[in-house]
Image (cartoon, rainbow, N blue to C red):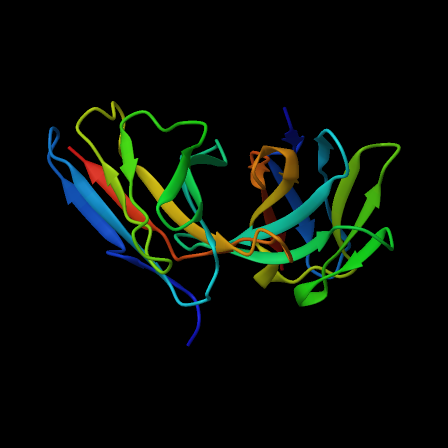
Amino acid sequence: DGGITQSPKYLFRKEGQNVTLSCEQNLNHDAMYWYRQDPGQGLRLIYYSQIVNDFQKGDIAEGYSVSREKKESFPLTVTSAQKNPTAFYLCASSIPEGPYEQYFGPGTRLTVT
Amino acid sequence: AQSVAQPEDQVNVAEGNPLTVKCTYSVSGNPYLFWYVQYPNRGLQFLLKYITGDNLVKGSYGFEAEFNKSQTSFHLKKPSALVSDSALYFCAVLAQAAGNKLTFGGGTRVLVKP
């Protein structure tokens, strides 16, 4: 099966702990993205990467970090500096030269207490 | 900067009736427009896109959308709604000049009643 996998589906952490969310794709897409979804606010871009070993901040990068050491993988770390980390996190990938649409993983729901 | 507006938080429609979900956009240059659907606790599924060509775009599950450049709109339509179409729908615009980033609207919840 081709697609994007995110693990785990549900994640619980104590405040002050860093946590890493996994995103893997076998679509051979160059570009990968991380979004945060909060109720009633749609999706907001955290980080994106268009090529291995390169990534850019999105609209809400503060308190998050990423790496892109392999084409297939784009893990997101939610650090203790993120003031409100409880949210639904979605990973996506695309071919930026076209056909442009992004394909999404199933998401990880992070709850920090 | 690009933006997308979905003016309705929720749309209610009876099964079998036509369904329309509204979207307007603002972007520099040619608009690349997309519709996605999200079911509870799931990722987004791609429905359709407009890049160029015919203003009426057909997509998955019987959905279609009409691109209107003068009104900067890209409304999603389905001639006959099903109860299973009940979900959250997102419109998005891609800005090539901004690293191919997608900007999403706030989403419209569709409720199809039997």
**Which quadrant is the N terminus of chain B positioned in?**
top right
**Which quadrant is the C terminus of chain B positioned in?**
bottom right
Task: Identify which residue, A33 or B9, lies in the foreground.
Answer: A33
* Residue in the picture at 21% in, 24% down: A81
Q: As drawn, is B14 to the left or to the right of A42?
A: right
Residue B95 in sight in this render: no
Residue B51 image offset from top left, x and y in percent = 75, 50
Residue A103 image offset from top left, x and y in percent = 51, 57
* Residue in the picture at 64% in, 39% down: B96
Q: As drawn, is B10 to the left or to the right of B14?
A: left
Please count the marks in the image: 0
* Residue in the picture at 45% in, 35% down: A45
* Residue in the picture at 76% in, 44% down: B75
Residue B64 in sight in this render: yes
Task: Identify which residue, B60 or A25, lies in the foreground.
Answer: A25
- Dividing the picture into quarters, in which one does residue B59 lie? bottom right
Q: Residue furthest front?
A: A53
Residue A83 image offset from top left, x and y in percent = 25, 22
Task: Identify which residue, B5 or B77, lies in the foreground.
Answer: B5
Residue A80 image offset from top left, x and y in percent = 17, 28
